[in-house]
Amino acid sequence: MRTIGLIAGKGDLPRSIVEEAAKNGLQVVAVALDPVADPESLSGAHAVERVNVGKLGRMIAALKKHGVKEAVFAGKVSKQLLYKNRITPDARAIKLLLTLKDRKDDTIMLAITRELEKDGITLLNTAALCPGLLAKEGVYTKKKPSSAQWKDIEFGFEVAKEMGRLDIGQTVVVKNRAVMAVEAIEGTDKAIERGGGLAMKGAVVVKVAKPEQDPRFDVPAIGPATIESMLAANASVLAVEAGATIFMDKIACVKLADQAGMVIVGHKP
């Protein structure tokens, strides 16, 4: 049986990857990054190793212990941990940080990818491993976007793509073709909360892949937590890039959205 390593961060995506891999006959060895990952959500994995998010050497050693040659990243690891001093890097991580030209997400992830490759571990395309999870083009909910909301969606895609090109974030919150919030280091849910508060009601949330998206990491993803954040923010529309966004627990998300009269749409700009 083919064995895949899973480097798991925060959120529902790691669990979804484990479930999808099992459907495809793959065995998963998960490294649950402490303190962000939930090891209990990875119970379907063949093995789960808990490793502090700053211990790069230990993370690689855990994968090698189980003979892992291929791995995927899944889940969020916020850089806030770095700035809040909640990461205690080991010698290998410190050496890596000192070589970085900046601390953009892609810069950090590419450097980690190279470290994995040094030890014979190839990082795989996350979306290719679970194609069944990708959002399709079309409206998922009973309610469809109004003409004004479609204008906000198109406007939001344009802004979000530019933010992605600058490697700032993948999500924007708009209303009446004005930007309420742009996702940065705080993550999608906090951006929705902030933008929804400014919009008061009826915000349109747009999430896209970066123009130069590396499919091995930071693939945009939505799930029940996204819908719950939108409900709390009184947002009206969630538009994601079809074919490039992982959509977890579609049935549960659509049910929640329909109950609230919300719109979910997969869109190709």
Image (cartoon, grey):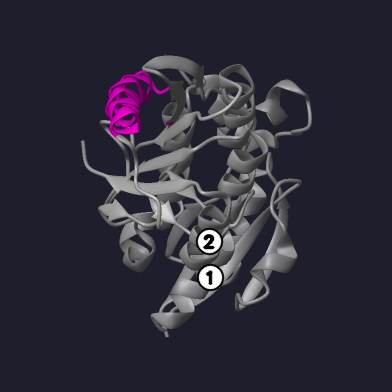
Q: Secondary structure at mark 2?
A: strand
Q: Secondary structure at mark 1?
A: helix
Labelled disc at residue 160: none
**Are the residues tagged 2 and 1 within 8 Å (C-beta)?**
yes
The structure residue drawn at horizontal position 48% and vertical position 59%, both measured from the top left corner, is 254
Residue 64: percent from the left, percent from the top?
Answer: 55, 64
Labelled disc at residue 6: 2
**Label 1: which residue?**
18
Q: Is residue 53 above or below residue 233?
A: below
Q: Residue furthest left?
A: 269
Rounded to the nearest angstrom, the CA distance separating label 2 from label 1 is 8 Å
- For mark 2, does the 10 Å Cα neighbourhood hold few (<14), some (14 to 19), or many (20 or more) residues? many
The structure residue drawn at horizontal position 40% and vertical position 18%, both measured from the top left corner, is 176
The structure residue drawn at horizontal position 76% and vertical position 46%, both measured from the top left corner, is 35
Instruction: Write the start and end of the magenta stretch as one range.
Output: 147-170
Amino acid at pointer 1: Val
